[in-house]
Amino acid sequence: MPAPGGPLIGFDLVEVGRFREALRRHPSLQKRLFTPAEIEYCSGRGVPELHLAARFAAKEAVGKLLGTGVLCWQEIEVTGEGRGSAPRVALTGRTAGVARDRGVGDVQVSLSHVGSLAGACAVAATCLEGGTDMEIVVGPGGEEAIARYGIIGLASLAGRPAVFTPAQVRELDRVTIEEIGIPGPVLMERAALGVSQFVRSRYPDRHTLVVCGHGNNGGDGLATARQLHLAGHPVACVVAVNSPSELRGDAALNYHAAEKTGVNLRVGEVPAYLWDETELVIDCLLGTGAKGELRGRHAEWTRLINAAGARGVPVLAVDVPSGVDSSTGSVAAGSVVADHTITFHAAKSGLICPPGSEAAGEVLVWDIGIPRSLEPEPDVSVVTEADVSVPGRRVDDHKYRAGYVALLAGSTAYPGAAWLAAQAALRTGAGYARLLMTSGAAAGVRNRLVEGVLHEIGPGDHLADAGPVLSFLADDRLGALVAGPGLGRDPATMAALRQVVLESTVPTVLDADGLFAFAGAVEELQDRPGLVLTPHVGELATLLGEPATGVAAASLAAARRAAAATGQVVLLKGSSTVIAAPSGDTRAVVQGPPQLASAGTGDVLSGIIGTLLAKGLTPFEAAYAGAWIHAEAGRLGALTDPQGILAGDLVELIPEVVAGRIYERGPSWRT
């Protein structure tokens, strides 16, 4: 931490050519990134793109200085400089509020460019007594909430990756109260403190309605309402009971405390005017122990909460959105759909996997003081940057040792799938990629391949004979096979593919059409070593012979069920990606943006994982590391294309992600 008055520094570099290309491809991007004054100033300069790139770097540098990243591009304005004077920086809106709260004084920036790079350095002094009170831990795609909101003890999933079942956390609560001796009301007060601090930081002065149930979740809400009221924040609180006498334990204690301190309390019904004036809703109806359908008053009040959300009123869920099963992630009809969920001690399993993760919105974890030394093994671990390592190259590596990947992919109907998977494999660092295609299918990619090499495995449009493929796979230099993208589902192709997978021992990614070859016959995969299966919900349902609705309703359990049934690593793609091993070990990748939902991005993922297998990672490591690299590339792409990312564009972003995760393997293969 800097001392009072000590400097805060942020620095950033931008490649001008790439920035110019982004502006060309996305005409609306300029108006999203820059204010009219910035655009007007730069348009009058000799090379406008160079000056805009420098200002883009300056905005990034200021975001790093604040420890938040850029909250809103136009809230950091870098206007013109006269000769001999520095550019002027003006902070507005939420960014100005964050700077003020953190004691950041006047921000100064310097801009420069060297060759193809534009750079900026931002410097400011802290002026709060004792400096800022933030601890900042930042990683790509996972900026800590402690940095974003300035609240010590509040973490994003990247900063608190251990995930537990509700039963595990209830046992931690019990041990903390009964054996450690920390009273339940103290834990509840601490829980409310995290929620109230978040509200005051993120939604200051907004009229807030706290909607409480009768259990401990309602007690958290009552304590939160009291803390907000005592801090001068406009708040009302409603409780879903007919009479306060129905409340028990800590919830009753906090109801009476709220009553005695003058909180605007309502019991039983919510007057219409409260909904009309509400600018923020806090959902404390049902907690982590609730399961099943919503009924009666709970169903009605969740409907009203969602109606407010539909009008644009932010919704904050406490511990879990009401109606979401925090064990499985299944979602009851009418469940609350939140913008944020603050959960306590650790994220619960049902909050990180669809559909529960989609109802939870941004998940933040608040430390309520339970000793981490008491924790059991996590139920799930969120994959973070620190978990991902890509083997680098030694000085005497050649193309085969750097990672030799074969791809049994593509057809006359879908030649692009093969090309995308091959390009992704090469961009991830494969030294050699060979496309195994029939002569008819190869015609669709022959003129597009530069680095990848075609190997024809027979005539016609469809794979019909496993023999040529198995002969090719006998090469002991081969590190991995990617099988299935765009291959087609011709019966002869499916039969040949099954033979290839079962008779080869090459580590293999089985994707897309390749999965259909084993529909209803997953037990055949049990004894085949080294597979990674990469289905989406529909493909997994077909593979297991189950309704897709059931798989979608509980994706975590479905992925684990498939891993056990096949004896293989299963990567279930979705808004959050679940990676399950037959041992029960489970990881989740949660930072993938919705822009990844476009044709061909799954082919890219299979190519990434193929290279990681070829470089020697285990199937489980290759699956979760590949999913993280894929999601992180998507996150970078979404910065410049908020509507959707083309799979080909995603391929070009892979090296930028991988470059930061390479580790040295030693000076020589001989060591």
Image: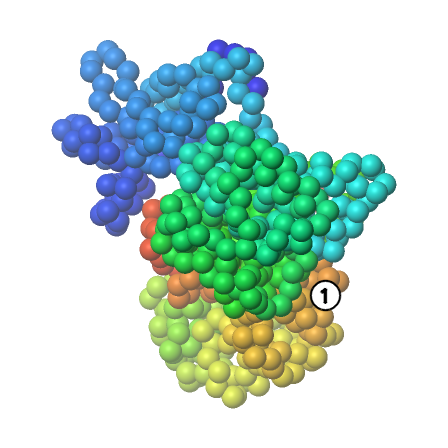
Q: Position of residue 325 (x, y in %)?
A: 62, 61
Q: Which residue is mark 1?
A: 582
Q: What residue is shown at x 60% (from left), y 35% (from top)?
A: 260
- Judged left or right of residue 224, residue 596 is left
Q: Position of residue 298 (x, y in %)?
A: 55, 61
Q: Quadrant of residue 671?
A: top right
Give the amino acid at mark 1: Pro
Out of 315 and 44, give the one closest to the viewer. Answer: 315
- Give the vertical position of 641 relative to 260 (above or below): below
- Give the vertical position of 558 relative to 286 (above or below): below
Q: What residue is shown at x 64% (from left), y 64% (from top)?
A: 291
Q: Position of residue 283 (x, y in %)?
A: 53, 51
- Judged left or right of residue 185, residue 274 is left
Out of 206 and 26, give the one closest to the viewer. Answer: 206
Q: Dot 1 lies on which element?
A: loop
Is residue 104 visible to the viewer in this orientation of the structure? yes
Q: What residue is shown at x 52% (from left), y 88% (from top)?
A: 492
